[in-house]
Amino acid sequence: MLVDGDLVLYETAAICLHLADTNPASGLAPELGTMERAQFYKWLMWLTNTLQTALIVYYYP
């Protein structure tokens, strides 16, 4: 969970995107509107929706 003032986020992808968008100089994500950013979105969603689900099933049967 991430608490940023009145904002409370609890989804992994939402937290990652919020941190990347509010801190662009950090280099956490590629620039908006680029092909690299689209790939970043693809892999972030895969990690949080596909891999994470598979790991939960594997480790917590």
Image: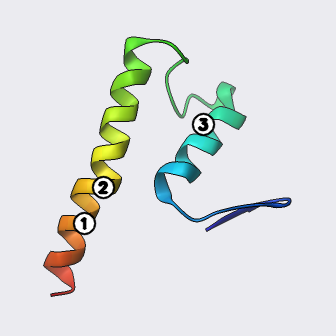
Q: Earlier in the sequence, mark 2 or mark 3?
A: 3
Pick the residue in front: 8 or 20.
8
- Image depth: mark 2 or mark 3 in front: 2
From this viewpoint, which residue is outermost toward the bottom? Answer: 61
| Amino acid type, residue under disc 2 in the picture | Asn
* Res 50 → quadrant: bottom left
Residue at the image point whose x is 22% and y is 57% from the top? 51
Side of 38 where 22 appears, left or right: right
Side of 42 where 18 appears, left or right: right
Looking at the rendered structure, the secondary structure element under dot 1 is: helix
Question: Is the C-beta separation of discs 2 and 3 under 8 Å?
Answer: no
- Residue 32, given in percent of the width and then of the height, sits at 55, 18
Q: Which residue carries the number 1 mark?
A: 53
Real-space Cα distance between discs 1 and 3? 23 Å
- Residue 53, given in percent of the width and then of the height, sits at 24, 66
Q: Which residue carries the number 3 mark?
A: 20
Q: Which residue carries the number 2 mark?
A: 49
Looking at the rendered structure, the secondary structure element under dot 3 is: helix
Q: 42 above or below 11?
A: above
